[in-house]
Amino acid sequence: MNILALLRQENASLISDMCEAGHQVFCIRDAAVHFRKLLNLPIQPVDFDENHAVMDMPAGFEFGETMPMIIDGIKDCIRDNKIDAMVTWTDAPPDQRVSILTARHMGVPTFEITHGATNTYRQGHFEYESYVDYVLAPGQHEADFRKFYGSNANVVVTGKPSFDWITQSENLKFSRNEARAQFGIDERRPVIVHAMTWRHPFSVWERDRDWGDKAVIEAHMNLLPICNTFLIIKPHYSQGNKEYANHIRNYCETAGVTDFAVMTGGPIVPLTMADLVVTHKSSIIVEAFLLDLPVVMFEFRERNDFSWFDGYGAELVADRGELYPAMARCLLDRETKERLAVERARGREYFNYKCDGDAGKRCVEVIEKAVAERQAA
């Protein structure tokens, strides 16, 4: 089977699973080169002809100028490479959306690997409906959320392939001690990881430009004399460039913040060091659950949809004044820690299905079955 994969680095394990199942995977050239180096697998590059005339678009909608090139490029790729299926990390942005619609127009089954695990960007409504034939969802939460808000998407619960690393990793305790030693952090010292998520105008912060980072930092400074906390601030990887990291670092130093570090890149190293994860409504919550870490999830706005998370392993905070007490309870109060540990057992399966390291394989099986049914019809 030939699969066109419009995927990101976080989906590398899924690409590996598709190749191991005997399928040929095609990616846009830059992504193909990257995945070849990363996985040492024969990912096939796809080139788009850039000689197509652009579409004249009004100011503010310039993103649409390249749509003819994308449509023709997807058509050529499907015809030339006899593509049987298309898989994308999301169908929300215009480029991915028009690619999916083009593939469907040509009769190719399409699949979305939900890149979030907690519906981060949806706040009691949907900005868009999914156009793919199948949404391969991390857990039952995705299916329930979509159904409640009236989505007609065809959701298949598989688990999230990019979380498979957690159950496949060995000796995490050793990794924790090794990581802490590398940063000079005593193994008994409480480490708080403040994980930022991606920020954009349609997210949960559109009304409140104070995204809560200051409240987390202030809570750390209040906890420091009590239990000697160390704070790791982790920007979302899409914003984790040197300039932004230096901006955060300079702010903290100017404000007199101590005992902290800014850490860019993936979540593995900070999570293996963590005793508490404090974040917005982000996928890293589920990764923390899988690593059996307590979580404080905060969202400072007049309305929220915490009902989807209540009782699944996170302390939920909607008021700035409650953030510090919640963080203190998670680190110091035995009853709170025991209650959250019980809740996390439910949260792991609700947000990530079986949590057995085989989510990628299940995704491949769903794709294989759907393609076979389409071809037999």
Image (cartoon, grey):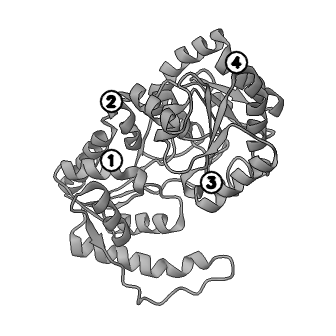
* Residue of label 1: 13
Q: Earlier in the sequence, mark 3 or mark 4?
A: 3
Q: Nearer the viewer, mark 3 or mark 4?
A: 4
**For this rendering, which residue is in front, 19 or 142?**
19
Q: Earlier in the sequence, mark 2 or mark 3?
A: 3
Res. 147 visible in picture: no
Task: Name the mark on residue 127.
Answer: 3
Q: Residue at x 47, y 55 (%)?
A: 90
Task: Name the mark on residue 46.
Answer: none
Q: Residues within 10 Å of mark 1 (few under 14, many from 20)?
A: some
Q: Earlier in the sequence, mark 1 or mark 3?
A: 1
**Where 281 falls versus 189 (above or below)?**
below
Give x and y (percent) for residue 171. Answer: 35, 27
Q: Quadrant of residue 322?
A: top right
Tell me how far mark 3 sits from mark 4, CA to CA.
36 Å
User: Element under label 4?
Assistant: helix
Q: Residue at x 78, y 42 (%)?
A: 214
The number of numbered discs placed on residues in the rendered structure image is 4
The C terminus sits in image quarter? bottom left
Q: Residues within 10 Å of mark 4 (few under 14, many from 20)?
A: some
Q: Residues within 10 Å of mark 2 (few under 14, many from 20)?
A: few
Q: Is residue 212 left or right of residue 267?
A: right
Give x and y (percent) for residue 235. Answer: 61, 49
Task: Name the mark on residue 170.
Answer: 2
Give x and y (percent) for residue 267. Answer: 50, 42
Amino acid carrying mark 2 in the image: Glu
Tell me how far mark 1 sits from mark 4, CA to CA.
36 Å
Q: Nearer the viewer, mark 1 or mark 4?
A: 4
**Where 192 falls versus 75 (above or below)?**
above
Q: Quadrant of residue 127?
A: bottom right
Q: Residue at x 30, y 35 (%)?
A: 358
* Residue of label 4: 329
